[in-house]
Amino acid sequence: MNPKTRILFIVLLVVLVWNMGCNTTATNQSENPDLLLINGKFHTVNDQQPTVEALAIKGNKIQQLGTTTDINALVGPNTKTIDLNGATAIPGFIEGHGHFAALGYSLIRLNFLETKNWEEVLEMVRQKVKTAKPGAWIEGRGWHQEKWDQQPDKTVQNYPTHDELSAIAPNNPVLLRHASGHSAFANKKAMDLSGISRETANPAGGLIIRDGSGQATGVFEERAMDALYLALKEYQSTLSEEELEAEFQKAVAMAQEECLRNGITSFQDAGSDFKEIAAYKKLAEDKELDLRLWVMLRRPYEETKTYIDQLPILNAGDHFFTVRAIKSQVDGALGAHGAWLLQPYSDKPGFVGQNTTPVSEVANMAKLCLANNLQLCVHAIGDRANREVLDIYSEAFKKNKTNNNLRWRIEHAQHVNEADIPRFAELGVIASMQGIHCTSDAPFVEKRLGEHRAGKESYAWRTFLDSGAKIANGTDAPVEKVSPIESYYASVTRKRKDGMEFFPEQKMTRVEALRTYTLDNAYAAFEEKEKGSLEVGKLADITILSKDILKVSDSELLQTEILYTIVNGEIKYQKK
Ligand SMILES: [Zn+2]
């Protein structure tokens, strides 16, 4: 080799080695985790590796799990590390049944969940009237007559009457939704605008509460609310598109913040219309959602049919938005005597509740879902309602020979005849139940249903789980606060804060309840392969808690705080 060639060779060699060096560093760096969570107590909800100390996140996925030493060894120049100092980490809570926009609206409108009596409700309206424009509707939600510490002077069927409310707001229609969502209170102005008079008949599936002279007292149960909502809609049509859009966006932002504060990383919305669905999809695609939404389309059959070609919507905006289910509803709720029963109410002789959507329409929905490979989720609270829906499902499944993994759901499955409970597991129907409803309703369940139906057939989690059924858990927010901790506490104790205990033999174990709030909720949405447990390759959705909810005493559970909420590998909430 002559000196010139020799120099050239050396230069080439140096360049080559230098490049290799660069490449090696680049490759290593691209494999280094972005975030390490160390010194934690992880409950993974993965039976193969139930507990670990630490976890590494790369991008939006879980990269590795192991001991703190193992995970620390993965550290790279750009890796961030959070020392959990012994805190507990679990798969991000999945809210299994809530109402996302309604939760947001409940936070910007009058919210009565914390009111102790009718007087407090009236006082909140009184304050609101002061700043309301004449003619503007005043909306609120969350009152519950069964939970008041004192009864109003004048009541009809245990409800107050509208006189005082009408006097407080003579120029503003007022519409106050019951906590359950299954009845509403209206003042005179709202009733006038809705065309309600003594002559107005009860609609099918609804009841107008009346005094001795036949006058409406202000309370409208189930489908009787339709007339009020029609009048409200008419008013809203006078508002500009921008005003409505701005309010919707504000509601979404409020709901999102509230969920993240409560450790929720995915939210299953039990019923939105197509306009809302389009808006959520856009937010997801614009990367403006901070938690994942899984939404059921909820419209009457004829309208649902017109949207069917646009479904499913799967994993839009990088796994932040999915619609693959249709919602329907066959009865009302227990509080308002709307649950549809096989035998009459114990406290309303001869009355068996409300069938709110004709069974034939629900059967048509089933056919539609079957033909389009969508899940069907039907609200059924009473034992008759549950039986009707199970009958519809089992008929539909017989026709569906190719696929027995449909994961259709019954939303609430609250009061189910003993003979029907095993049918959930047999048919593969998911019981989408809300732990917190049990303790929240506890003061009046036995009054409504008597001892047998209350003890053996209400929120019968133990019987459901022992029969092999899968339970999805949630809060039905804004019917209840969107707190997985409170619903988890109810699931494992069946105790109220006031000490009352509701048939504790039906409670879930701690491990079962955690599963219902994570992996089984994911399963109920066909998402168990990407979330619901902490495993390599799954989405990095993780909630960090101040207490070990599998171990601490019952009384300590409710003091559990959310320290971090991590969605898609990013910290979306951190306790200050
Ligand atoms: Zn609901």
Image (cartoon, rainbow, N blue to C red):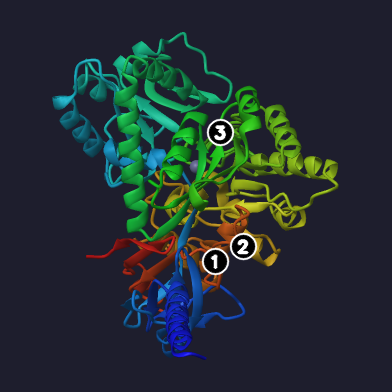
**Compared to 406, does 210 lie above or below?**
above
x, y percentage for residue 351? 59, 32
Say if residue 334 shows up in the picture.
no
Mark 1 or mark 2: which comes first in sequence?
2
In the picture, measured across the screen, residue 152 lies left or right of residue 88, that is left
Q: Is residue 69 above or below residue 220?
A: below
The residue at 34%/29% (across/down) is 245
Instruction: Write down the residue under mark 2.
Output: 529
Residue that carries the numbered disc 1 in the rendered image: 538
Q: Do the residues labelled 1 and 2 touch (CB within 8 Å)?
A: yes
Q: What residue type is labelled 3?
A: Arg
Residue 534 image point, x, y percent: 52, 71
Spot occupied by residue 387 in the image (x, y as percentages of width and height) = 71, 43
Question: Distance between the Cα atoms at labels 1 and 3?
Answer: 30 Å
Q: How far apart in space, not on screen, are marks 1 and 2 (Cα)?
A: 7 Å
Instruction: Please report whichever mark, 3 or 2, sits nearer to the chain's N-terminal start.
Output: 3
Neighbours of disc 3 within 10 Å: few (<14), some (14-19), many (20+): some
SS class, disc 2: loop
Residue on which disc 3 sits: 298
Helix, strand or loop at label 1? It is loop
Q: How crowded is mark 2: few (under 14 residues within 10 Å), some or many (20 or more)?
A: some
